[in-house]
């Protein structure tokens, strides 16, 4: 059997709600088109499980990790979250190359380096898929479009909308404000609740993103801001907190907006209610997101080049259907 092209250590792999798990799965999937990929997860090593395209190998519980005895680490190891436990394990097995996506608080050693996901330094730019059918029909639960969509930063059931949504609903009395919180979309107008519908699938969320005037994400993902990218792929401008890392980079690059306080949020939302301003930002957002995150074949090429640079022999470039 050929040695693996890469070994992926997925601390967050099994957390389906984690943005880091989404990113790691995307990278592993692309790398698998370049050669064999082995995925390790912090589970019982005697009970490996199937996971779609991959047969997972366990490393034991996080407090007592151990490297599989039959697996050599003389290849590129890609780690999703460099925790102290993972850093200790890698220090023991001494992989040929170690790349990590998120340096939680584990100390990198020697040539280990962070693999950038957004911004400068040749980022990976993972593939973020959307279904274009979402653009054809609005969400079945609402009879209107061109609303301000607020992705909440709260969990649990609340009688009132998040403060940011309340500000928007009070400032723009004629505007519909839709808040997505805990898999429920609630519609507000003039600070009055008009109704609620469940958001059961990713398609439900995509329909909401596709038919919004703007997407205000109050808690964007810390690694790539996935929902912001999805909104931009539908041509929906984004408004995000100034200190939101990747999301703020996306907004500044596309004519979106960032805000530090209530007044800046309202100013940004008001600008997108102007047709010309919104149209320009929408076109820029769609072009930016599709070019960077819309081509799975491009991600396969980037991963192939990365593995080649890290010392692997290049594999034949696969056909993408």
Image: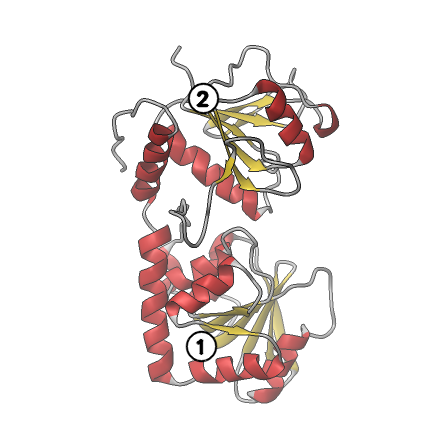
User: In front: mark 2 or mark 1?
Assistant: 2
Q: Are marks 2 and 1 in contact (CB under 8 Å)?
A: no
Which mark is drawn over residue 300? Answer: none
Q: What is the x, y in percent for residue 307?
A: 37, 30
Q: Is residue 136 visible?
A: no
Q: What is the x, y in percent for residue 233?
A: 38, 60
Q: Earlier in the sequence, mark 2 or mark 1?
A: 2
Side (left or right) of 39 relative to 129: right
The Cα–Cα distance between marks 2 and 1, rounded to whole angstroms, is 50 Å
Q: 211 or 284: which is nearer to us? A: 284
Looking at the image, residue 102 lies above or below residue 241: above
Q: Which class describes the residues within 10 Å of circle 1: few (<14), some (14-19), or many (20+)?
A: some
Looking at the image, residue 97 lies above or below residue 147: above
Q: What is the x, y in percent for residue 146?
A: 44, 77
Q: What is the x, y in percent for residue 143?
A: 48, 75
Residue labelled with disc 1 = 146
Q: 310 or 153: which is nearer to us? A: 310
State the count of labels: 2
Looking at the image, residue 179 lies above or below residue 77: below
Which mark is drawn over residue 75? Answer: 2
Q: 167 or 6: which is nearer to us? A: 6
Residue at image point 53% right, 53% down: 201
Residue at image point 49% right, 43% down: 23
Q: 202 or 301: which is nearer to us? A: 301
Side (left or right) of 298 relative to 220: left
**Quarter in which the C terminus is drawn:** top left
Instruction: Identify the secondary structure beneath mark 1.
Output: loop
Q: Image quarter for residue 277? A: bottom left
Residue at image point 74% right, 28% down: 63
**Quarter in which the N terminus is drawn:** top left
């Amino acid at each position: 059997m050929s040695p693996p092209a890469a070994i992926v250590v997925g601390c967050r792999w099994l957390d389906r709600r984690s943005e880091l798990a989404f990113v790691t799965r995307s990278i592993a999937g692309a790398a698998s088109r370049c050669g064999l990929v082995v995925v390790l997860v912090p589970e019982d090593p005697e009970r490996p499980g199937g996971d779609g395209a991959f047969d997972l190998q366990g490393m034991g519980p996080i407090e007592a990790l151990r490297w599989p005895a039959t697996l050599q680490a003389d290849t590129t190891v890609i780690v999703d979250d460099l925790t102290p436990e993972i850093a200790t394990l890698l220090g023991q097995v001494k992989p040929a190359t170690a790349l990590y996506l998120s340096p939680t608080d584990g100390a990198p050693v020697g040539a280990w380096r962070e693999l950038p996901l957004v911004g400068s330094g040749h980022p990976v730019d993972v593939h973020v898929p959307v279904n274009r059918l979402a653009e054809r029909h609005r969400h079945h639960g609402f009879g209107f479009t061109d609303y301000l969509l607020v992705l909440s930063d709260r969990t649990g059931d609340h009688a009132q909308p998040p403060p940011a949504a309340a500000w928007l609903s009070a400032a723009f009395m004629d505007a519909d404000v839709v808040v997505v919180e805990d898999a429920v979309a609630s519609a507000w107008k003039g600070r009055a609740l008009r109704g609620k519908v469940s958001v059961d699938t990713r398609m439900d969320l995509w329909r909401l993103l596709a038919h919004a005037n703007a997407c205000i994400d109050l808690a964007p993902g810390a690694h790539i801001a996935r929902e912001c990218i999805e909104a931009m792929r539908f041509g929906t401008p984004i408004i995000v907190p100034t200190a939101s890392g990747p999301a703020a980079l996306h907004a500044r690059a596309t004519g979106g907006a960032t805000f530090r306080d209530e007044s800046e949020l309202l100013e940004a939302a008001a600008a997108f209610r102007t047709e010309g301003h919104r149209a320009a930002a929408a076109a820029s957002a769609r072009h930016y997101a599709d070019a960077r995150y819309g081509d799975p074949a491009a991600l396969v090429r980037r991963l192939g080049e990365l593995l080649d640079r890290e010392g692997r022999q290049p594999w034949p470039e696969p056909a993408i259907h």
